[in-house]
Amino acid sequence: MPRITEDTRNRNETSIRAAMDRLLTGDLPPGGKCDIKTLADQAGVSRTAFYPKKNRDGTTRPGPYQHLGEEFERRLRTLQEAGQITDPRAAQLERLKAQVAELKERVARRDEALSELTGFKTLAISRIAAQQGEIERLRRQIAGAAGIRRLPVPRGGPAT
């Protein structure tokens, strides 16, 4: 694998820092996130350059831009701890989670109200049925009473 020149390394670091600043201010490309992969894509460098490498003898050495990857993650963590969300998708995700929780609460309240109303409806129907039964019983009692006659109603209205 060919080594890069100092000039190329400086240009890449400048490009990485510019991409880092754009991502941390929320200027994300379509479909991108605020992460190392998008940083590497935006800077035009390999993502593997941000991770440690292994020598032939098995020892590890830092990747050429590992320090910039660590700086990016540190700055991102600082922004997140300060309450700033640099990734609009993360903000949307948080907003949707809050909305889902609120909707679940509303559904639970409506289910409770529906249960109460169903109980009220059942009670009202049973009371109406009982009253109807009582009315029918009283009508049968009146009709069955042989000694009772209805009085005629005067034609001119009620008598004074």
Image: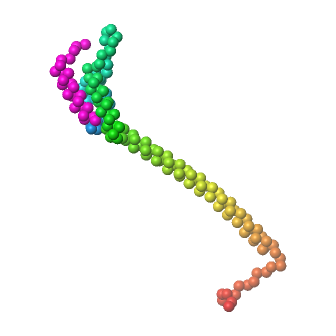
Whole-percent x and y of residue 87? 33, 37
Which is the main secondary structure of the residues drawn in magenta? helix
**At x 23% / y 28%, what residue is drawn?**
16
* Position of residue 63 in the picture relative to residue 10 (left or right): right
Residue 81 occupies quadrant:
top left
Instruction: Please say if 153 is above or below 37.
Output: below
x, y percent for residue 157: 66, 87
The relative height of residue 87 versus residue 7 in the rendered view (above or below) is below
Q: Is 13 colored magenta in this rendering?
A: yes
Give the residue furthest to the bottom: 160
Residue 90 counted in the magenta span: no
**Identity of the residue furthest to the top in this view:** 57
> What quarter of the picture does the C terminus occupy?
bottom right
- What's drawn in magenta, residue-wise? 1-24
Q: Residue at x 53, y 52 (%)?
A: 110
Figure check: 155 above or below 48: below
Q: Is residue 19 left or right of residue 111?
A: left
Quadrant hosting residue 147:
bottom right
83 and 14: which one is in front?
A: 83
Of the 4 image quadrants, the one containing the N terminus is: top left
Residue 68 makes an appearance in the image: yes
x 46%, y 47%: residue: 102
Which residue occupies the foreground of this view, 142 or 65?
65
Looking at the image, which residue sits at the far right? 147
Q: Position of residue 10 (x, y in %)?
A: 18, 23
The residue that appears at 83% across and 76% down in the rendered structure is: 146
Q: Tell me if residue 46 can be seen.
A: no
Snapshot colouring: rainbow
